Image (cartoon, grey):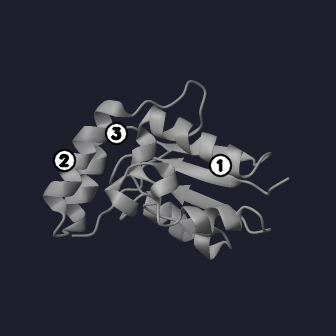
Amino acid sequence: MSEGVILLAGLPGCGKTTHLCQMCQDGWLVFDDFKASAFDDSSAFRKSRKCRTLISALRDSLRRAVADIDFCNTKSRAEAESVLMSEVPGVELGWRFFENDCSTCEANIRNRNRPSLETDLKKLHKYSALYRIPQGAGVLPISRNVQT
């Protein structure tokens, strides 16, 4: 049986990348923005340019973590689970969810001061409408970005 994978769901600006950086320092193999620049600009989990690498990594002994804003969408999470379980039968999946706090995420996005500000804000509002944290799930606090 595979060692498993942690999947991170959270809005843009919630701290997924910061969390993954800490996990990486702790020896995890991390996949941030998993679906970014996917083949055919697709939102399908299998179309990620990182998918084959993740599947291969699931067959070794490394600890793995995957994050993508599209995991805010319940259907996207179900698709990821389906792909991973079909590719690596018996794989252990663990979900971590960040708080659904649009205003704090927006403040973090604005404080990042990136050229992608407007795009990031549009994604925030799109995904905040879709984001449903499962009943009983543990919820991680949003990292507060105080940089300017």
Q: Residue furthest right?
A: 1
Label number found at residue 122? 2
Q: Nearer the viewer, residue 68 or 103?
A: 68
Dividing the picture into quarters, in which one does residue 147 lie? bottom left
Residue 23 makes an appearance in the image: no
Q: Nearer the viewer, mark 2 or mark 3?
A: 2
Q: Nearer the viewer, residue 93 or 45?
A: 45
Which residue sits at x=36%, y=46%?
Answer: 11
What separation in Å lies between label 1 and label 3 (alpha carbons)?
Answer: 29 Å
What separation in Å lies between label 1 and label 2 (alpha carbons)?
Answer: 29 Å
Q: Is residue 67 left or right of residue 41?
A: right
Say which amino acid is labelled 3.
Answer: Asp
Q: Nearer the viewer, residue 118 or 38?
A: 38
First in sequence, mark 1 or 2: give its number.
1
Label number found at residue 84? 1
Image coordinates for residue 47, horizontal then vertical, percent: 46, 56
Which residue corresponds to mark 3? Answer: 101
> CB under 8 Å between callouts 1 and 2?
no
Which residue sits at x=69%, y=67%?
Answer: 57
